Amino acid sequence: MKAGSNLEKVLAAGHFAVTAECGPPQGADRKVIERKAGYLKGYVDAVNVTDNQTSIVRMSSLASCVLLSQLGLEPTMQMTTRDRNRIALQSDIFGACALGIKNLLCLTGDHQRFGNHPTAKNVFDVDSIQFLQIVKTMRDEGKTAAGTDIEGRPALFIGAAANPFADPFEFRVLRLAKKVAAGADFIQTQCIFNVQKFAKWMEMVRDRGLHERTHILAGVTPLKSVGMARYMKESVAGMDVPDEIINRMRVAGKDKAREEGINICVETIEQLRQIEGVHGIHLMAIEWEEIVPTIVQRAGLYPRPQL
């Protein structure tokens, strides 16, 4: 065990893992975290806490993770290099580990021009791959990025993100290979609506043996409306939403759109479970965390293993 987190234990035991995302509030209201924790507790193996996702200011990932831990859930702290240089990144990691955080997802982060502070100055001192290397060195060698000794190695189960759909398609598996080589113990992917294309990506992953060196958790998102499906297809970079999915949401109509979105999500999970090398799912409900228990149960992934 590298960190001994629940997520690491579930994956190491060969179970099909379930993680979900929790978006912190755009303010200091801890009741938002408490409410979302209530939806997720018992239905997932770990909860990702986003780090100012889409560059919109929210409660810090670290503080939200500590709140989730106090509520009995295992958090996965997401950290972006957009807002921190290597000094701040390592400092926050020391603090997080001292507070009991065991899972870390290393990200570059969305550019600030997409958020609510478009004129803010970014950092991007390192990218996500360099960040992974820094964390792995801290954990495995007990050294900082400057080569100095660490007083108490951070025991972390290290994760990274992957987008199987961005162009050029053939390049995506090479980028995954770099992240695995840099130290990614687990991978969480972009939302999957085009299962056929994802299966092709997984075939390239297996050809390189990457599925045996890291745990791949396939990202899924329940759609709420045909408008959401069209927005993701047309306006979100690197997203692949087939016309078939949009047509299903359109035919469902406004009254049954959410029900159809859940149906599509559950069907997608069932297909993903059949793909060799997929070790779990990452549920990104996007401000719809209350639907996670329904999806997990309908997908036959409840109860979760107790290790």
Image (cartoon, rainbow, N blue to C red):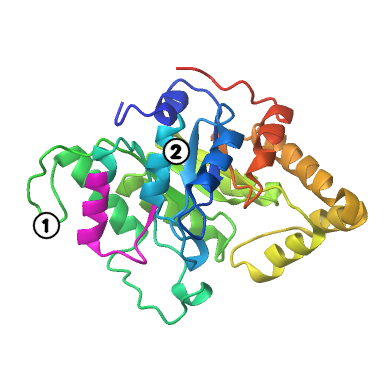
User: Is there CB contact under 8 Å for labels 2 and 1?
Assistant: no
Camera-side residue: 38 or 50?
Answer: 38
Q: Which residue corresponds to mark 1?
A: 146
How many angstroms separate mark 2 from mark 1 (CA)? 32 Å
Residue 124 x/y as whole percent: 32, 69
Badge 1 density bin: few <14, some 14–19, many ≥20, Cα 10 Å = few
Q: Residue furthest left?
A: 148
Residue 32 x/y as whole percent: 54, 47
- Give the residue type at disc 2: Leu
For numbered disc 2, what is the local secondary structure? Answer: helix
**Front: mark 2 or 1:** 2
Camera-side residue: 222 or 40?
Answer: 40
In the depicted structure, whether residue 80 falls above or below residue 17: below
Residue 154 x/y as whole percent: 22, 39
In the depicted structure, whether residue 54 falls above or below residue 105: below
Camera-side residue: 191 or 198?
Answer: 191
Q: Which residue corresponds to mark 2?
A: 68
For numbered disc 1, what is the local secondary structure? Answer: loop
Is-magenta flag for residue 81?
Answer: yes
Quarter occupied by the C terminus = top left
What segment is highlighted magenta in the picture?
A: 78-95
Residue drawn where x is 60% and y is 47% of the image: 284
Q: Quadrant of residue 253?
A: bottom right
Residue drawn where x is 15% and y is 51% of the image: 144
Q: Residue 64: which numbered mark, if any?
A: none
In the image, taking residue 135 as reference, residue 274 lies left or right, namely: right
Which of the marked residues, 2 or 1, is nearer the chain's N terminus?
A: 2
